[in-house]
Image (spheres, helix red, strand yellow):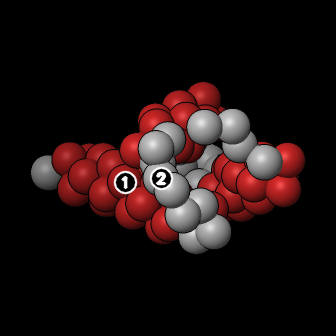
Amino acid sequence: MAIAADETTQLRLVEQQLLRAFAGRVPDEDICREVSAGMSDFRDARIRTFIPVLLQKRVADRLRRRTSERSLRGAS
């Protein structure tokens, strides 16, 4: 299924917001990789309206877990 231009723009905005939110805590390459991996979860979604919101939440949750796990390991 092809991605509409508007959805592509929204997904770029999601990626930019995540890059800003996790700057200095997670490498940019890792964030971009998580966004790409997350998009594959929605590849066959028939209803696409909420994909950017769902993707942002899912990736942010993954990145938060990673950063909290790192800080826990560093505190030990």
* Residue 68 horizontal/vertical position (percent): 31, 59
* Residue 18 horizontal/vertical position (percent): 64, 56
> Label 1 amino acid?
Arg
Residue closest to the far left = 76
Q: Secondary structure at mark 1?
A: helix
Closer to us: mark 2 or mark 1?
2
Q: Residues within 10 Å of mark 1 (few under 14, many from 20)?
A: some
Who is closer to the viewer here, 40 or 44? 44
Disc on the earlier residue, 2 or 1: 2
* Residue 31 horizontal/vertical position (percent): 56, 41
Is residue 60 among what the camera can see? Answer: no
Residue 45's disc is: 2
The residue at 85%/47% (across/down) is 5
The residue pinned by badge 1 equals: 62
> Label 2 amino acid?
Ala
* Residue 74 horizontal/vertical position (percent): 26, 47
The residue at 53%/49% (across/down) is 25
**Quarter of the image where the N terminus is located:** top right
Q: Secondary structure at mark 2?
A: loop
The residue at 59%/61% (across/down) is 48
The residue at 62%/48% (across/down) is 24
Residue 31's disc is: none
